[in-house]
């Protein structure tokens, strides 16, 4: 349907025929081109390492991130506002190099590098946004990391209209780059289920605005996990280990792997939905998680559980 002004809309059968364009993902299912991800968790829980590991994949030093394939490679830009320079050099960068990730295509910015008058950063000031954009224009990063969002503004994080401006302005300053935001989790509320979405500090705007949420979790017994939720992935909790700072997926449960193989080989289960339901039944895992695992395995990609 089209009118004289050129405005148009398409019915589903016609819309499905439109060309989707080039590859949409940087990290498959997790970070879209020009999109955004938010990593959050309690202080000193390794959020920065998780972001650095993502950049190691994006810059071509690792084939994946948490077993999610890297679909496009490019330059990374890390705005580092939360850790003193000496510690950042001798601990974070050292640990990445120690694990074989020299991050030679990652640019860093910290407060002492910034011109006078631009620290602290205030993303509601036009001249500050111009400065952020100017640096990004010189580097032309595929992905920008902001660590942490709290150091980019002085507003009340509980006010949605304030945080809307913060996140929107940061994205506009770095466009067309994708952005990985890092922030802290808020204290859990008794009447609210623990999840990647519910536990983001401040207003709910951030959790609804980004494409993917990653919550870093340390359990009572020292067990680590990542809670994931996004537009292209089902809500799931992924068991992790840290060695001693970087994040790695915990080895798979042999019993679950056998159950998954059994379901994949069952010729009476004709569809992805049937296989996912059966896997959920015999493994006692969430059906949406099982659907995601079965889908990825059927496509020949690493699963995320």
Image: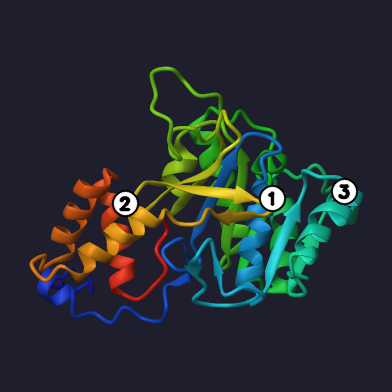
Relative to 65, residue 194 above or below: above
Return the residue nearer the eye: 154 or 269.
Answer: 269
Residue at image position (33%, 69%) is: 297
Q: Quadrant of the C terminus?
A: bottom left
Query: Can residue 80 be seen in the rendering of this structure?
Result: yes
Badge 3 or badge 2: first in the primary sequence: 3
Q: Secondary structure at mark 2?
A: helix
Residue 275 picture location, percent across and down: 18, 60
Query: Can residue 232 be seen in the rendering of this structure?
Result: no
Q: Which residue lies under the disc numbered 3?
A: 87
Q: Exactly how many numbered labels are in the figure? A: 3
Badge 3 or badge 1: first in the primary sequence: 1
Crowding at mark 2 (Cα within 10 Å: few <14, some 14-19, many 20+): many
Residue at image position (69%, 33%) is: 154
Quadrant in the picture for residue 274: bottom left
Crowding at mark 1 (Cα within 10 Å: few <14, some 14-19, many 20+): many
Badge 2 or badge 1: first in the primary sequence: 1
Mark 2 or mark 1: which is in front?
2
Return the residue nearer the eye: 286 or 90.
Answer: 286
Residue at image position (42%, 78%) is: 23
Residue 208 picture location, percent across and down: 41, 43
Relative to 105, residue 254 above or below: above
Q: Which residue lies under the disc numbered 2?
A: 289
Q: Which residue lies under the disc numbered 1?
A: 48
Contact flag, marks 3 and 1 (Cβ < 8 Å)? no
Q: Residue furthest left?
A: 268
Return the residue nearer the eye: 162 or 144.
Answer: 144
Q: Quadrant of the N terminus?
A: bottom left
Contact flag, marks 3 and 2 (Cβ < 8 Å)? no
Residue at image position (79%, 58%) is: 95
Relative to 11, 171 lies left or right: right
């Amino acid at each position: 349907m089209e009118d004289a002004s050129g405005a148009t809309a398409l019915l589903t059968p016609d819309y499905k025929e439109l060309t989707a364009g080039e590859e949409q993902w940087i990290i498959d299912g997790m970070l879209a081109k020009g999109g955004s991800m938010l990593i959050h968790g309690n202080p000193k829980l390794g959020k920065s390492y998780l972001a650095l590991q993502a950049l190691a994949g994006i810059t071509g030093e690792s084939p994946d991130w948490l077993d999610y394939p890297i679909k496009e490679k490019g330059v990374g830009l890390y705005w580092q506002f939360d850790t003193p320079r000496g510690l950042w050099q001798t601990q974070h960068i050292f640990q990445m190099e120690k694990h074989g990730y020299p991050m030679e295509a990652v640019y860093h910015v910290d407060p002492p590098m910034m011109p006078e008058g631009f620290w602290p950063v205030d993303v509601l000031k036009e001249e500050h946004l111009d400065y952020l954009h100017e640096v990004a224009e010189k580097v032309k990063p595929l992905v920008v990391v902001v660590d942490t969002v709290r150091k980019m503004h002085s507003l009340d994080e509980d006010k949605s209209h304030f945080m809307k401006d913060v996140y929107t302005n940061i994205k506009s300053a770095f466009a067309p780059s994708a952005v990985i935001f890092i922030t802290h989790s808020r204290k859990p509320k008794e009447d609210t289920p623990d999840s990647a979405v519910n536990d983001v500090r401040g207003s709910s705007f951030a959790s609804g605005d980004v494409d993917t949420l990653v919550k870093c979790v340390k359990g009572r017994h020292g067990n680590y996990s990542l809670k994931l939720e996004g537009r292209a992935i089902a809500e799931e909790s992924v068991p992790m280990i840290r060695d001693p700072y970087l994040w790695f997926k915990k080895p798979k449960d042999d019993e679950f792997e056998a159950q998954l193989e059994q379901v994949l080989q069952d010729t009476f289960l004709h569809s992805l939905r049937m296989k996912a339901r059966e896997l959920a039944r015999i493994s006692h895992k969430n059906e949406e998680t099982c659907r995601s695992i079965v889908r990825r395995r059927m496509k020949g990609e690493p699963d995320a559980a």
